[in-house]
Amino acid sequence: MEEPIIVGIDIGTTKICTLVARLEEDGPLRILGVGIEPSQGMRKGIPVDLRIVSQAIARSVEKAARTSGLEITSALVSLAGSQVASVNSRGVVGVTGRTIDEDDIVRAMEAARAVAIPHNREIIHVIQRGFTVDGQAGIRMPIGMHGYRLEVETHIITAAASTVENLRNCVAQAGVDVSQFVLNPLASAEVVLSETEREMGVIVCDMGGGTTDLAIFIEGDVWHTMVLGVGGDHITSDIAHGLRLPISQAEEIKKQHGHAVESEVREDEEFHVRPFGEEIPLQISRRELAHIIEARVDEIISLVLQEIKRSGYDGLLPAGMVLTGGSSVLPGMRSLASQVLGLPVRVAQPENLIGMTDKLHAPAFSTSVGLLHWAVLMTEIGSEPNRRKPSIQGGGLDWENIKSLLKRLLP
C-alpha cells in the first residue's frame, strides 16, 4: 500500500514554508515538495492583513505543489502569537465496565476539556499528561486495567478565536483546508528533542522573527507552553534604530556581522554601513553592533527565565534548554542563553530527512518539519512517536480517530 502524503504549512512572521512529504517504509520522511515564501501581512504571529497573508500562502503552496507534482488540498498549519495561552486541567469519570477501555479514556479527556473557556477563546490542543486509577497516580496507559475511577491530567492550549478563524480563512483563500492547527513549539519538539530530554525535563525555545515560543517537557509530557511576543525582528529593529539604517540593511548586517556577546568580539573587527542621510559609507565597530544585539537577546532570554519561574518548574529542567528557530543561529546566542538561564543549552535543527532537503537542515525549519512529524504521530501506525500521548484537538472530538490512536498505543 502506498504511504500517505502529508503536508505542513508553517506560517511565520518572516517566512511561510509549505512542505509535502511521504513517510518511507521503515525509514525517514522523504520531502517531495518545498515552497518557501517571504511572509507578509503577519505581525508577532498574528495576521494583520488577510489579503496579503493569503496571497503569500498561495504562492508558498503553489511552489510546493509544483515541485512535488501533487495537488495540495489540506494541511497541518502552525500557530503562534502572543494570544496563545494554556492551562492544566483534570477529568474524572467512573469506569463503565470491569476494565478500562478506549471509551473511558475519551470520556475522561472530554471531561477535562470541559474546563471553563471564555467564548472568545478556541481550544487548540488537549494533551494528556498521565492517568490515575483508583488513586494510583503515574499511570501512562490504563487500557486493560481494572478500576472504578479514572482520572486524567491534561494540558489545554487555547488561542484567540478570532486569530484562529482569520488564519483558517487565509489558508482557505489559498485553496487549502486546515486539517489541524499545531502550536509551534510542539511541532518543533518533534524534531529537536530526544526521548531522554523529554523524560529528564527540558524546555524547547523556538525563537522566530516575531515570537519566541516555549514548551516545557517533564517525564515525557507537556507541562507548560507559552508564546512571548518578541523575537529576532526586534533585534533587527534595534539595529536599524541604533545605526540609523533601513530594516532590510539592518537584517543583512545582523546575519553577516551579528554576535550576541559583545565580549566575544575582537576590538579591531569593523564593517561598513550607509546610514540614512550619509553620502558615503561609515565604518562601524562589530563590537558596537554586538552591544546593541546583546541587550535585546539578554532581555528575551530573561523573559524566558521569568516564564520558567512563573510556571513553577524552574528546578525540574536538568536537560536545560533546546534552542531552535531562525534567530537561534546568531553567534553567541547559545552561550548567552546558558549564562542567563544557568542551564545547559544546545542549538538544534531537523535531521533524518531525505529528498528535497537542501535548505531544511537548519533551525529555521524546525517547526516546518515538525508539522510533518506531528502528522505522522497522529496518523501513522507503528512509528515510534505514536507511543506517546494522544492529543484531542479543538473544535470537537474525532472519537473514531482517538479510539484508533489509543488502540495503536496498546503493547
Image (spheres, grey):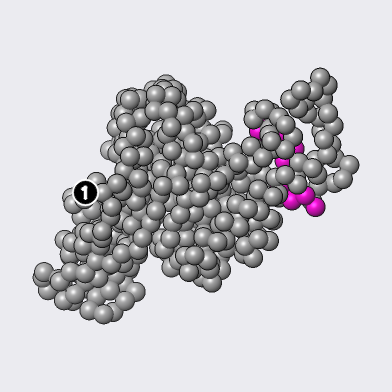
Amino acid found under the numbered disc labelled 1: Gly
Magenta span: 251-263
Q: Is residue 165 visible?
A: yes
Residue 73 x %, y %? 30, 29
Q: Residue at x 24, y 75 (%)?
A: 133
Secondary structure under tag 1 reads loop
The crowding category of the residue bearing disc 1, from other C-alpha atoms within 10 Å (few below 14, some 14 to 19, many at least 20), is few
Q: Is residue 102 visible?
A: no
- Residue in front for this viewpoint, 71 or 236: 236
- Residue in front for this viewpoint, 274 or 6: 274
Question: How many discs appear?
Answer: 1
Residue labelled with disc 1: 396
Q: Residue furthest right?
A: 268
Residue 33 x %, y %? 44, 29
- 252 in magenta: yes
Residue 183 x %, y %? 41, 47
